[in-house]
Amino acid sequence: MSLLEIKDLRVTYGSGAAAVPAVRGVDLTVGSGQKLGIAGESGCGKSTLALALLRLLPASATLSGEILLDGEDVLTMKWGRLRAVRWAGASIVFQGAMHSLNAVHRIGDQIAEPLLVHHQASPAAARKRACELLEQVGLPAGRANAYPHELSGGQRQRVMIAMALACGPQVIVADEPTTALDVMIQAQILRLIEQLVADQDISLLMISHDLAVLADTCDRLAVMYAGRVVEEGPAQEVFTAAAHPYSRALSGAFPRIGDPASRRAPRGLPGDPPDPASLPAGCTFHPRCTVAVDACATRDQALRDAGPGRQAACLLVEPGAGTPSQHGTEEARSTS
C-alpha cells in the first residue's frame, strides 16, 4: 500500500457561479521512502495541492476526492485526529522561511514547539532535541538562542527543515524550498534534504517550477498544468525525453550544463497558464502548444500510457510512445 495516495482530488475557491477550480482531478501516489516531484508554472495548482494534503487551505476552499495518508483519509479526519497527524504524520517545509518563522521567538523554542504540542518530550528534552536537530541540518546547536532575523536565508531554510523533522513524520512536503536562495545555497539545501530523506527513510513530495532540480532530486516527476497532471513518470525520463509538449517546453527553458546549444539559445514558452476561472475548451494547453491540431481545441485528454511507468495527457502520444510522433500528428489532423 502507498504511504500517500491522492485520488481524484479537486479544489475550488468560492462557490456557485463564482467557483474557481484550482485543482481538477489529480491522482498521485507516493510510496514509502519515495521522492515525488511536482513541477509546473505559477498558477498551475502546485501549492494548492500541497496545502490540501494537510487541510491548510482557507475556508473559501472546497475539497473533494481522497487524500489517504497511511490508509486514513485526511479529508474526513476530525480536527483532533488531523491535529495529531500534522507534524507527526506529515509536515511541510514552506517556501518563505522568514514568513513562516515567528520573529519574536528564538528558533530553538520554535523547533521544540511541535514536540511539546504532540507530547513527545518534556520541555527540557524538547530543547535538547531542538539542538540535536539544528546540528543535523548543519547549524551549530548554539544558534538555538538566535532569532530568525539573525540568520541568513539559507540558515532559516535549514531551521524550517529541522522543524519539519522534529516529530519524525512519514512524509515531508517541500513547497519550493529553495526558490529564494542563491544557487550555491540551493544546492546545499537540496543535498541536505536528499540525505535526510534517505537516512530516515522518509517519503518526500517536492514542489518546484524547476524541472532540473526535481529531476536531480526525485525518483518520479509529475507535471501540472491548469490544475491537472499532464505527465507523470521516472524523473530523468520526463526531464530528458518528455512525452507532453508542456513538459518539453518546461525542460527546454533550462540550459543544460555541457550543452552549448541550450546555453546559447534557451527555449522559452510564450504566454501564461490560463485563468482558472475561464479555462479554454478542449486541451487547456492547446492555445500555447506548438504541435496542436484542430482536435486539441475540442477534445480534452486524460492521462494515457506513454511508455513503461509513464503517462501523458496528449492526443498525439501513441500508447507506449515516448513523444508525439509525426505519424500521430498527421493521423490526428486527418480525424479532427
Image: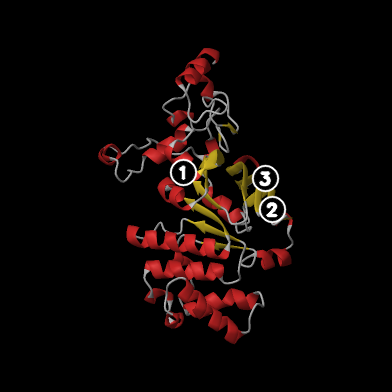
Residue 237 or residue 89, whichever sits in front: 237
Determine whether 219 is above or below 293 in the image: below
Instruction: Give the quadrant of residue 158.
Output: bottom left
Q: Residue at x 51, y 75 (%)?
A: 133
Answer whether labels 3 and 2 touch (C-beta < 8 Å): yes
Q: Is residue 318 something one can see in this rendering?
A: yes
Q: Which mark is residue 7?
A: 3
Mark 1: which amino acid? Answer: Gln
Dot 2 lies on which element?
Answer: strand
Determine whether 123 is above or below 8 in the image: below
Of marks 3 and 2, which one's residue comes earlier in the chain?
Answer: 3
Mark 3: which amino acid? Answer: Lys
Residue 170 percent across, percent down from the top left: 62, 62
Residue 271 or residue 335, whichever sits in front: 335
- Residue mark closest to the camera, 2 vs 1: 1
Q: Residue at x 47, y 80 (%)?
A: 106
Q: Which residue is mark 2?
A: 68
Q: Residue at x 48, y 26 (%)?
A: 324
- Calculate the distance from the C-alpha at mark 1 to the C-alpha at mark 3: 25 Å
- Residue mark closest to the camera, 1 vs 3: 1
Determine whether 296 is above or below 154 in the image: above
Instruction: Give the quadrant of residue 291.
Output: top left
Q: Which residue is mark 1?
A: 236
Q: Which mark is residue 191?
A: none
Q: How is the image coloured?
A: secondary structure
Mark 1 surroundings: few (<14), some (14-19) or many (≥20) residues within 10 A: some
Extreme bottom residue here?
124
Dot 1 lies on which element?
Answer: helix
For the C terminus, the image quarter is top right
Q: Is residue 105 something one can see in this rendering?
A: no
Residue 194 percent across, percent down from the top left: 48, 59
Residue 190 percent across, percent down from the top left: 43, 59
